[in-house]
Amino acid sequence: MSENVEVLRAGCYFCHVRCGVLVTKKDGRIIDIKGDPDCPHNKGYVCQRLDKQRYLDGFVYNPNRLKRPLKRAGERGGGKWEEISWDQAFDEIAERLIDLREKYGPETLAFTEGTARTWTWLHYKFTNLFGSPNTGGNGTICYSSDMWLEPCTYGGFCSDKSDWVGADLVVLWGRNTIASEPLLWHWVDTNMKERGAKLMVIDPRCSEVAQKADLWLQIRPGTDAALALGMINVIIEEDLYDHEFVDEWCYGFDQLKERAAEYPVEKVSEITWISPEKIREAARMYATAPSACLPWGQKGGDASGINATSTIRAKAILRAITGNIDRKGGELIAPPSRFPPSFYEHYALPQEQRDKMIGNDRFPGLTYKGWDIISQAYPSFYPYACAPLLFRAMRDGDPYPVKALIVQADNPVMAFSNTKLVVEALMNLDLLVVHDYFLTPTGALADYVLPAATWLERPDNCYTVMNHRPMYFGAQARVIDRFEGGTDVDFRDDYEFWYGIASRVGQTEKWWGPKATDMLDFQLAPMGLTYEKFYNDVKYMVGQKKFEKYKEPGFKFLTPTGKVELYSTVIEKLAKEMGRDFDPLPSFEYPALSVEKHPEWKDKYPLIMITGARFLPMYHTEHRQPGPYRDLHPDPIFDINPNTAIDLDIHEGDWCWIETHMGKIRQRARLNTALDPRVISIQHDWWFPEKEEAYPSLFGAFECNANVLLDDSPETLDQLIGSWQQTGVAAAVHKCETQDF
């Protein structure tokens, strides 16, 4: 191989799965990306998101990437910028943060994160040392809710450690892995073909995975908690539960049995629109499988509003009473964390400041109040401020002024419910800093927009988030240096970004040096390694899975009772401390934004709306830039049953208004015979980088964005964890008078 060609090892961060890849460079420019066959995780597999040319042209070398730090010139949201140096940006941001801290207190600073594909611990380190508890993001309707509620049940977190290839039955509940994480589907598909494993899918849509299922339950949106309780009832009534595990290792079975009796199959059928026969079939199928795994899934609970806690807890209970906890083919209870406390610096934040976390006194589950209860059992859980209340604090100054926000790997204008309120909140800030790859609707409102490094532009000790295999840990090269191979982007990676500010606000001694490799060396030091030695000599490390740890002498689950808590003493304790009626057992009520809760909506909003449909190769709010990704999906699409469409004079491809009590947006109709006539399914988070940047356009943020339609009023949220409702929302559809958009 000639001297100007080199092959470097990296880890793809296009989604949460983090596949190992090999990257070939010639004369400093990438010419090939392929799966690394030596990676113990994906073993050479990569999905269509990593199409070499599409990814390079549409992302890494996209001419529209942010290239230099930008400072707002003129009024906020005016679309006018000046280029500045990184030193100037860091100096000015630090100076303004110090001034705001002196004026309002450290809690005036907030932070939001996206999908945990950055070094998420760094913002906690910075904000905790700064003195602010107000870190948050969309984890409330995603991963973080499970991360708190499962430790309340098991004393640990397990639903991202499903044994996808060892299970005799895989249950995908509100999760379409073909569109979201194709490697995970690859595992399931392989398991079905090679081992004869079965697949159950619970989803209102006949999604790509539902089409492959042995049993598909087409559930009414937002009624997942009722279905889970109905399945629990069948399993108990028909004596299908694991007596040995329940008798020895479960607490509160009698209380659970009594609660489940309130959800007979016939009642659950009326609520969920699933026949009694199918509910019984699903319960029997899950309970009698030699082994079954039930991975976490967003629409199966996390984003269900007032039912979120109950749905997540009921799914956790299903795993436990069938004995599928910590056993091969089920869910592994993994060690809490590989990070020492100095990564997060939670203990550096005084109790007085913890108590000020937005949401602490209203939705305590994910806040420091909840963290204090489970931190000994699960210290790697990271507390979350309640986002709807956080944005209200920015807008209204209640309970105190939140005047500064740092955003990294997130796009709040697009990603949070009640878009209008979010924009009003951001407009009222004194300081908004965005660290991202492209100028987004959120970035358009910022004071400073700073170019971020992609995963190809930073070194890393990459690790997998979701896997069936033992946890892997792999050294990743900084494949692209600044200004290399024709790129003119002066990026900074996550560590350089935070260190640049931290070193200017008095935190220097708490960080590991000015470069990311300083942090990586610290991370590896307990293993006697440096980053350089890890990359060159070790490459990958693989953990060992150990099942059925509860059979070892002296074992206890890390809960107050030492058992799996079907009846949660943790939630019971929190309820007593706060004088609230948090239920230690799961239950069901109709979603807050349903016609059952608002009978006056029946005629005006006769349909039930689902948001959040995923579609390849997009991921969350990303890759909307014109080019090789948008060419595949130029317009937002919503699904509607043909019979419903006929009644509304809607044809394939028509632009239509979709309306709720919050407002209206437009998307193109796609006729879908497999969708219930009472339901519409709309794509999420659409924005248009080709449109006008300046407010009020913000790249078309209000035109097609599903979050415009969603309410985040506190009374509509899950009262324990603050999850807002994204599915099961009453809505209406009508064809746009003009089709010229």
Image (cartoon, rainbow, N blue to C red):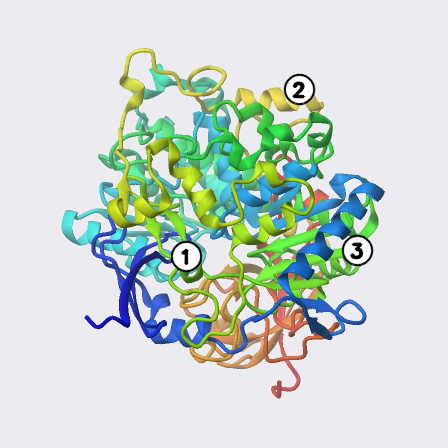
Whole-percent x and y of residue 17?
A: 37, 52
- Of callouts 2 and 3, the N-terminal one: 3
- The answer to which of 296 and 349 lies nearer the viewer is 349
Whole-percent x and y of residue 219?
A: 45, 51
Q: Which of labels 2 and 3 is toward the front?
A: 3
- Of callouts 3 and 1, the N-terminal one: 1
Q: Is residue 92 left or right of residue 552?
A: right
**How many residues crowd mark 1 within 10 Å: few (<14), some (14–19), many (20+)?**
some
- The answer to which of 249 and 163 lies nearer the viewer is 163
Residue 265 visible, this orientation:
no
Which residue: 80% across, 53% down?
395
Check residue 13 in the rendering and tell me which mark sits there, or answer none: 1
The mark total stands at 3
Evaluate if marks 2 and 1 touch, with contact meaning CB atoms under 8 Å apart.
Answer: no
Name the residue tied to disc 3. Answer: 430
Q: CA distance from mark 3 to mark 1?
A: 32 Å
Q: Is residue 561 left or right of residue 31?
A: right
Whole-percent x and y of residue 665?
A: 65, 70
Name the residue tied to disc 2. Answer: 576
Q: Is residue 438 left or right of residue 77?
A: left
Check residue 465 in the rendering and tell me which mark sits there, or answer none: none
Which residue: 49% across, 72% down?
643
Q: Which of labels 2 and 1 is toward the front?
A: 1
The residue positioned farthest toward the top in the image shown: 554
Evaluate if marks 3 and 1 touch, with contact meaning CB atoms under 8 Å apart.
Answer: no
The residue positioned farthest toward the front in the image shown: 3
